[in-house]
Amino acid sequence: MNSEQEIYKHLFENSGEGMLVTNNRGIIEIVNPSLLQLFGYQKSELIGQRIEILVPDAVKNQHQKHREGYTSHPEKRKMGGNMDLLAKRKNGTEFSVEIGLNYCSINNDLKVVAIVTDITERVEASKKLKQLNKELEQKITTRTLELEKSQKLYNLISRNFPRGIISVFDKDLNYIFTEGQELDRIGFSSLNLIGKSYTERFKNSIGKLIKEKLDLVFNGEGISFEFEENGAFYVVNAVPLKSLDGNVEQALVIEKNITESKLAQQKVKDNLEKEIELNELKSRFVSMASHEFRTPLSTIMSSATLAGKYAEKEQQEKRDKHLNRIKSSVKNLTSILNDFLSIDKLEDGKIQLTKSEFLFEELVLEATDEMEYYLKKDQHITFHNEISKTQLVYSDRNVIKNILINLLSNASKYSAKGKEIILKLNPINKDVQIEIIDKGIGIPEKEQGKIFNNRFFRAGNATNIEGTGLGLTIVKKYLSLIGGDISFKSKEDVGTTFTITISNILL
């Protein structure tokens, strides 16, 4: 028996995939250890049984009809890759499988070869292949089988090795043997590789890697490694094939396409990162809500109670004090609810732009007038306008107004009483540039990268100031709707300048 025949024999007996052979009546004639392990049977319990012993009860009749149809018109076929194909273990449990079918005729008898893969355990494929290689190394030079009867069968098994390639190289790294379903996918065949160098397929840096690894095998080492080629990921197990005198003459290399499991691992990683982000978001929301809702509600309750105690006419001033506190708290709650409603509408795509022509200065003055009610004591807005009073723009009036009020409100909120807020307008070609400058607490440098990207985020120096942390997120989303952008410069305890550019709106 030559080495290629030995390879066929040991591939069948020691393959990590479950394999079996039936006759044309569906009677199981040959099984390999992997299939027995997969289904939990002893060899004596399966030989002579119909293949339906491995099929769930609910589909046995249907399977028998399909089997009879297959034996009438046999063909190479792969089942279970994109559908829920189930098999049944000895203990009655069911699991998903992928089955590769092929056939051959031996002594005028039809033999059906099935390769069964448990696709629920793909992540363990590397371990199984390592075990396969170890067993192949130990047994590759052992027992002899009858060549004429087995050669077709083992060749068929190699040719249908699922999602992988089985190759044998000589010392010069020329292909002696190569087969497997993956060859078809990458556009090669055994005919155009056998007798040629490994460089026929592997080029550039991958070719260098393969040579380094196979040199280790010819030094007597069994190896396992991974590589990427044209977007596909492979795990490779390689072992030396020794002659009877103990010299390494050839290397057996088994490649397995693990792209699906790699992508699945990445998906799990991405989902985990999203889950961590969501948990952080929930924590920030709970922290914000517990403070921002509880404080004004407590103020309303206490002020309402105290206001009721001042029943005399001359106590009106004290009643007014508590009524103003109630109004202020209601204003805070209204602002919080407006933030939630705005972010919800923006993310659900419920904001419909209504563009029109309008005087830009008129809009800005309207926004600053409305802000007067919200400014702290002795705060004032200084307006510097380089745009003509008669300058028309074309955009969504309400969106721009909401952006201005949001940023002016922040400037007031994070500045002390009596501090000036500066609002500048500048035309740049067809664009409008808006600067809002405050002399407030500023944003700590180490936290500036989180301002636009983290919902409910409050800088460390702003935790005692009312707010949801949604304002700048809302502004950025509004600007994306109207073709605008925002940037800022800030220094802690000095102040912050927000710069907005809205493109192509000047008429």
Image: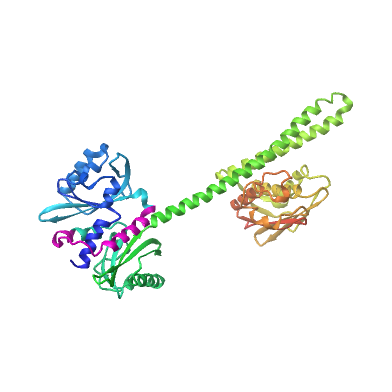
**Residue 139 sits inside the magenta stretch:** yes
Q: Which residue lies furthest to the left in this view?
A: 108
Image position of 212 (left or right of 407):
left
Image position of 392 (left or right of 108):
right
The image position of residue 222, as x and y in percent, is 35, 65
Q: Which residue is drawn at 26% across and 48% down?
A: 36
Q: Residue furthest top?
A: 311
Q: Which residue is drawn at 49% across and 52% down?
A: 269
Instruction: Name above or below for residue 504 compared with residue 331.
Output: below
The image position of residue 480, as x and y in percent, is 59, 53
The overriding secondary structure of the stretch rendered in magenta is helix
Q: Which residue is drawn at 72% across and 39% down?
A: 332
Instruction: Name above or below for residue 160 compared with residue 397.
Output: below
Decide which of 228, 334 is in the foreground and name it.
Answer: 228
Q: Can residue 159 be seen in this view?
A: no
> Which stretch appears magenta?
123-152
Q: Can residue 441 be seen in this view?
A: yes
Decide which of 219, 469 is in the foreground and name it.
Answer: 219
Image position of 184 (left or right of 431):
left
| Residue 161 occupies quadrant | bottom left
| Residue 230 occupies quadrant | bottom left
| Residue 137 occupies quadrant | bottom left
Image position of 94 (left or right of 326):
left
Q: Residue furthest right?
A: 314
Quick one: quadrant of the C terminus? Answer: bottom right
Decide which of 381, 191 is in the foreground and name it.
Answer: 191
Decide which of 318, 62 is in the foreground and name it.
Answer: 62
Q: Which residue is drawn at 72% across and 43% down?
A: 466
The image position of residue 68, as x and y in percent, is 17, 44
Instruction: Name above or below for residue 152 compared with residue 196.
Output: above
Quick one: quadrant of the N terminus? Answer: bottom left
